[in-house]
Amino acid sequence: MSAFQKNILSKLYQAGLLHDVSAFIPQNKRLSISEKLHISILKEERQVPLLLHQKLSAYIAQECFQIKDPLILNAIECHTTLKKNFNNFDLIIFLADKIAWDQSGTPPYLKDLNNALQDSPRKAALVYIDYLLSHNPLIIHPWLLAAQKQLII
Ligand SMILES: [Fe+2]
């Protein structure tokens, strides 16, 4: 393995470790804490503060764990929704989050996602997004829609 590959793997590992680090913040405190920290909040995130955990995790990774690398911080910040102009690093963290989800059992979309992954990570991401959008999500995050639009192209 080259030094470059080792470096990227190390960064993926750091993003993987820290992506949900804000999970200790109770659901009913996520909005008020985000406001106090001057994190930008979208209206969809006000409606479903669960969605703020990706931004809060990026904040904690930067301020408490001294992560300065924007590659890592950006991937943490969009690991739930992906976002417009995502890069391959963001895409890997997004897919890893969906493959090893935080609920019990196997994700219902996993087989299709893994099949699509044989073609490309982009197709796999679309499988997940299509699944989510067709199963009455609590809210549709605009970053997810922006990512979907770019994945379709
Ligand atoms: Fe998460």
Image (spheres, grey):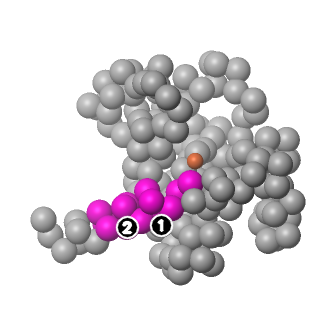
Instruction: Name the residue located 63 percent from the left edge and 41 percent from the top edge.
Output: 144
Instruction: Name the residue located 40 percent from the left edge and 49 percent from the top edge.
Output: 92
Please name the amino acid that badge 2 sits on: Lys
Numbered mark located on residue 9 in the image: none
On screen, residue 94 versus residue 139, left or right, reads: left
**In the figure, residue 73 lies in which quadrant?**
bottom right
Q: Which residue is mark 1?
A: 72
Please name the amino acid that badge 1 sits on: Ile
Secondary element under disc 2, as helix, strand or loop, is helix
Instruction: Name the residue located 49 percent from the left edge and 28 percent from the top edge.
Output: 104
The chief SS type of the magenta part is: helix
Q: Which residue is mark 2?
A: 11
Q: What span is in magenta?
A: 8-20
Q: How many marks?
A: 2
Residue 149 position in % (x across, y down)? 58, 38
Q: Nearer the viewer, residue 25 or 112?
A: 25
* Name of the residue lying farthest toward the left: 1
Measured in 3D between alpha carbons, the distance from the residue under mark 2 to the one under mark 1, in whole angstroms, is 6 Å
Answer yes or no: is residue 151 visible.
Answer: no
Secondary element under disc 1, as helix, strand or loop, is helix
